[in-house]
Amino acid sequence: MSHETHDSQEKDFTRNWVNSSRFLFYLQVFCILAFVLGGCYRLYHQHYAGKPDVEVQSSSKYKPEYK
């Protein structure tokens, strides 16, 4: 019976550091990917939302107009 309890402890998340480190690695990759995709999605939907109408001096245009 002691052997049965020993087998169940090997499958525990805190006891088996190889499986837990693999799980934590994939969890970090998923979280970083979710943040990057979420940021890209937000930037895509807010691109130039409130584009101001800026006045450019006539002397600094591509074809300048001088007085």
Image (spheres, rainbow, N blue to C red):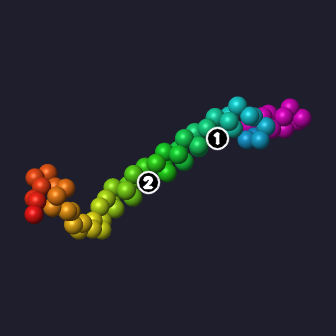
- Farthest residue to the right: give it: 2
Q: Which residue is located at x 27 percent, y 68 percent? A: 52
Could you say where residue 63 lies in the image, as x and y percent from the top left? Answer: 10, 52
Task: Please tell me how crowded label 2 is: few (under 14), some (14-19), or many (20+) other residues with Cα within 10 Å.
Answer: few
Q: Label 1 amino acid?
A: Leu
Q: Quadrant of residue 65?
A: bottom left
Of 61 and 43, the residue lying toward us: 61
CA separation in Å, label 1 and label 2 = 22 Å
Question: Which element type, helix, strand or loop, lies under badge 2?
Answer: helix
- Point out the tag, 1 or 2, that comes first from the N-terminus: 1
Image disc number at residue 24: 1
Whether 5 is among the magenta residues is: yes
Q: Which residue is located at x 21 percent, y 62 percent? A: 56
Give the main secondary structure, helix, strand or loop, of the magenta stretch. helix
Image disc number at residue 39: 2
Question: Which element type, helix, strand or loop, lies under badge 1?
Answer: helix
Of 37 and 30, the residue lying toward us: 37
Whether 23 is among the magenta residues is: no
Q: Quadrant of residue 12?
A: top right
Task: Please tell me how crowded label 1 is: few (under 14), some (14-19), or many (20+) other residues with Cα within 10 Å.
Answer: few
Could you say where residue 41 lies in the image, as x and y percent from the top left? Answer: 38, 55
Q: Is residue 7 left or right of residue 34?
A: right
